[in-house]
Amino acid sequence: MARRKFKEIPEEDIQELHAFLEKTNKEEDLVLSTLSVNIKCRTENQKKLINSIKQNEITICSGLPGTGKTFLSCAQALKLLKSKNPGKYKRIVLIKSVTTLKNEEIGFLKGSLEEKMEPYIDSFMDNFRKLIGKARTGKLRSLGLVEVLPIAFARGRSIDNSIIIIDEAQNISTDNIRTLMTRIGDDSKMVILGDVKQKDIRNKKDSALELVLEKFKDIPNFGCVELRNPNDVVRNPIIKTIEEVFENL
């Protein structure tokens, strides 16, 4: 069999690539250096969540609506991204179930993968916008420092040097959560979030969140946190009343 001859890459192309990478790295450093992220926990359980993310490789959290679980996780992820440990965390990877609400199918979405994911991921982005503003959030995404990843595209990947946040885990099946949890690579952290009482998955028995909370609660390098106390609700006091009414139906 004849050997294929490979063309050498022209020196000017190599120099152009190096210049591009150097420019990108400088942009990343500049954006990260201007980030200011302050986390103020308002309840003991919120402190437990932040401490768990700091101390464990994988944190699993179930919380009532309005407890700030996603907001705090995004804030801590930004702090880790900006941390003084250079090269360890290079990006934040956002993964969210695209299960729609019961009886609220939205039909086929046109556009690129990123455009299709946008309606589902926008609640994630709201947290970043509140923390660092719209412009910096857009810059982080354009530089690849914040990446959106559909569950189906996570299969087979090893996600290194990343803070991985998985939201709406109550709508993820056991098989899929296993796939996602085993994607964690070297020098990475994973945060799994959801609310065991807000399942939109068709077969509620397939929901993985309760299972992983139970099975991993006493294993080293895993942290399991629950924000189920009504006093953990910090978004709007009226949410406590709403939850109480529906609990008593």
Image (cartoon, rainbow, N blue to C red):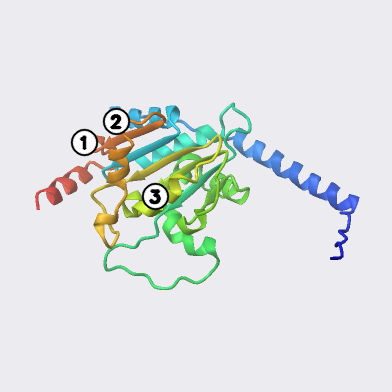
Q: Nearer the viewer, residue 186 or 96?
A: 186
Residue drawn at x 88%, y 60% as measured from the top left: 5
Query: On residue 177, which mark appears?
Result: 3
Q: Label 1, on which residue?
A: 229
Q: Earlier in the sequence, mark 3 or mark 2?
A: 2
Q: Is 114 left, or right, of 178 in this rendering?
A: right
Determine the CA span between mark 1 and mark 2. 9 Å
Determine the CA span between mark 1 and mark 3. 26 Å
Measured as percent of width and height from the top left, residue 58 is found at 42, 36
Disc 2 marks a residue whose amino acid type is Asn
Q: Nearer the viewer, residue 126 or 199?
A: 199
- The vertical placement of 199 against 221, above or below, is below
Q: Residues within 10 Å of mark 2 (few under 14, many from 20)?
A: many
- Under circle 1, the secondary element is loop
Residue drawn at x 29%, y 53% as measured from the top left: 207
Residue drawn at x 26%, y 43% as measured from the top left: 64
- The vertical placement of 64 against 36, above or below, is below
